[in-house]
Structure formats: C-alpha cells, structure tokens
Amino acid sequence: MNADVIVIGAGIVGSACAKTLAQRGMNVLVLDSQRGGATAAGMGHLVAMDDNPAELALSRYSIELWQQWAPQLAADCAYRNCGTLWLAANQEELQAAEHKGETLRAQGVTCQLLDAEGLRQTEPMLRRDLSGALKVNGDSIVYAPNAACWMLTQGGTRIRQRCEQVSAVEGNRVRLADGSWLQAKLVIMANGIHASELCPELPIRPKKGHILITDRYPGRIQHQLVELGYAASAHVTSGTTVAFNAQPRPTGQILLGSSRQFDSLSPEVEGAVLARMLQRALDYLPELGQLNAIRSWTGFRAATPDGLPLIGAHPQQPGLWLAVGHEGLGVTTAPGTAQLLAEQLLGEPSAIDPAPYRPERFLHTHELKEQHR
Amino acid sequence: MIELSLDGQLLRVAQGTTVAAALYLGGDGNSRTSVSGQRRAPFCGMGVCQECRVSIDGQRRLACQTLCRSGMQVETQP
C-alpha cells in the first residue's frame, strides 16, 4: 500500500477530499498532472445555485462549510463575502428574481430584493435602466488555486503530493506514466475533464470558458454581478453561449465572464467568443469600454448531462470513488463534495441526501450488467 | 519638442517619443507599483506583457504603446 487513499487531481475538489480525509486520520497521496482544468481558470465565485433542489442543497451546504473555514483561510486565498446581485433587466426578470428569492429563502439562504432605485444606489456603474436585483448575502469569492493549496496544507504530514500523470485506473490501484503501479485502500478520481481519459464510461464533456481581467479600478463595483439569464446559459447542452458575470477582485481589478462552449479542447482565447462575452458585459457596464483589460484566458469545466456532479463509489470498480463533473460550480461545492464522499466511505449518516449525486444514475452496477447478459 | 508632466515634473521630449521612453528620460524608469508594493517597469516594449501600465490623463494605458503628446499628465504613483 502506498497510502490509505490516492486522490487523482489536486484541483479544488481533490484538495478538499484530501483535507477532509486526512483530518479523519487517513494518509492521503495526491497525484496531479499539472495540466489544469477548471480550478486555476475559473472565477472562484461561491454561489448558491438553485436550478434544481439537489444543486441548491449541495451549494448551500458547501457555502456553510466555506463560511466555517473562512477564519482559518490563508490571506492569499482572498476570501471576501461580497455577496451576489442577480440582475433583472426587465419586469419579467424581476418576477424571476422574486421567485428565486422565495426558493432560496425556503432553504434558509438570506436574500432580499432591490428595486431599480436601490440597485442604482448599490451599484452605480451598472446601466441605469435595470429593473432591480436579488441580493444574496452569503455568497462570497475566493482565489481558488491558493485555496486548493491551503487545503492540502491542512492535512499536515498526512497529505503527500506528487506531480504524476495517471495513465490507467483499476479499482484501488493506478498506473503512472512510467508504467509503475501505486495501490491504496481506495482511489478517488477528482480530475475533472481528464476523468473520462481513465474511465471512458463517465458521461463527462468539456465545456470551455473564457475569462478576462482588467487593470486595477478600486471601488467601481462592490458585489459579484450576474445576469438572471446566467443559469439558462449555464445549462444549455450544445453550441456557444455567453452571460454577463462580473466580480470585484480584492485588488480592485474586475474579473469578467462568462462563456460556455462544447466540444473544444483548444486552450486558445477565441476573439469571436471573447467579443460576444465583452459585448454582453458592456450591455450591463457601459463604462467598461474605458477600462484597460490586461489578460484573458480559458479553462474547461467538466459537464455532466444533468448538471450535477458524480459523487460516490464507481458502481463497476470496487475501490474506485468518484468526485467529478462539477461543471462551473466545483469551487463552490468542493467542501460539500468532500464531506459527502467521506461520509459514504466511512458509513456515516449524511448531512444532505447523497442520492442525487450518485454515479449509478449514469452507470449500471455489476449486478445489473450481469442480469442484462 | 513636446512638453509633458511626469509625476508632476515637467519633461521635454522629442516628437515620436513613447511614454515608456519618457519614463526613463525623466523618471526612475518605472510605470507603476504592483499589488505587493513592488515598483514595475516596461519589459516587452510591444504591448503584450502589461508591465508598463501607467495613468495618462486619468486613464490606465500602456506606456510602450502610447506616444507623448503636449500637455499630457503621466502618473506612475502609487
């Protein structure tokens, strides 16, 4: 045995799993290929998403865990409780904001509706004719690459890391690029879009995203600003969509998203997609055109058909566990994912119902396969 | 010659001088101070590295991509 647990992937989800299991006394070996995916590219927005009850349950629970961790987070994790404003561009969207508020409040998420004047006073850089917004107080931001590093330090000597690319997985053992095998009591796959290389049966597709950041303009915006149409954009299953999403970085920079593209694994910044994304941002923040952009980059979300992650035992490979497919919500839901996985591994009662995230919804079990023969 | 202001000091440069060159001619060569408090200066000279961000008449601009104009106010602090 090379460890109690081998975690494949040192992104936010793998790091959260390593932290949670190490703190329960397990020795964890984390392997990462340094190819990147979503954690180092994304916005790091900790957001309660409510497109279905399971998404809300996992994101709400995870934000609670982030709030518990917040006082201990290293300063370079840049955690800020800035809140989210879901922007309504017209009366119809304002009704959608009201409905969203009811859904969130029913699950204990604090939020309030701002009318048009309230929104103008709160965020004067926004276009003046918006109808209002839903303010979600508990949402926050974090610099995810540093948060992942911080989590790995929380296990003390129980967490070891190696820079390795895994070339095959068989239950509780993994083959490295040099052909050698490592073994543990169990293996956790937390490697986002790269998971399907090792397990082609997983229904994971890469969804490319573009990000752009400006020079420092302190105080121009105060909250994470997201158009209410964002969720619709996030859940489209083909083609290219953009939605307005802007974040005030603690440095005074403005971080802009978002785009979603299927079936591209090319990391290049695409001018046409970036232009659409920025046009959308200009619609909401007309003065953006005066600001200086300094960098743009891309990343890849691991998308599943129903938009929910795969958390639990691989039904066909004893010893292999999955924590993948978090799409654009992995930074938010990493703590809850790690907690759910640990509870299942140790046979403990779950804080939230684990059923909606079980891999069985896409993968037949061995028994089922036998019956079908 | 063109007369501009660099951090409040008057500076005269030849027509066609970039702001990046003016930073060296009239100041300490630096364009800005980073988030971590380091002074930073032009590096690539071709508009890619973004190191030479500077305030020109209140707007953030790249010093290496901007030509000096008469009356221009260039600020490298903070």
Image (cartoon, rainbow, N blue to C red):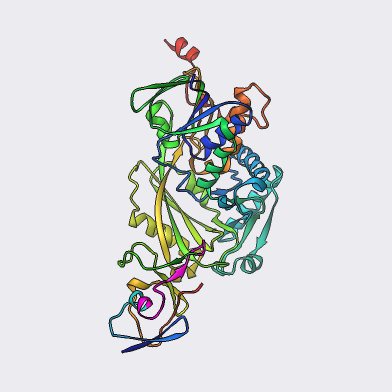
Q: Main secondary structure of the magenta part?
A: loop
Identify the residue at image location x=62%, y=59%: A133
Q: Residue at x 68, y 48 (%)?
A: A102
User: In this picture, which residue range is highlighted in magenta?
Assistant: B23-37
The image quarter containing residue A352 is top right
Image coordinates of residue A218 in percent, x first then y, are: 55, 67
Position of A176 relative to A326 (above/below): above
Residue at horizontal 45 percent and vertical 38 percent from the top = A302
In the rendered view of the protein, which quadrant contains the C terminus of chain A? top left
- Name the residue nearer the viewer: A96 or A17: A17
Q: Is residue A203 left or right of residue B14?
A: right
**Horizontal relation, residue A122 to residue A322: left or right:** right
Is A191 colored magenta in this rendering?
no
Farthest front residue in view: B28
Looking at the picture, how far across and down is residue B33, in whole percent?
A: 48, 68
Give the image quarter of residue B66. Answer: bottom left
Q: Nearer the viewer, residue A371 or B75?
A: B75
State whether residue A108 is above or below residue A363.
Answer: below
- Nearest to the observer: residue A10 or residue A211: A10
Residue A229 location, x and y as percent?
Answer: 52, 52
Q: Is residue A103 left or right of residue A327?
A: right
Q: Position of residue A89 (x, y in %)?
A: 55, 61
Q: Number of numbered discs present?
A: 0
Name the residue at 33% across, 71% down: B64
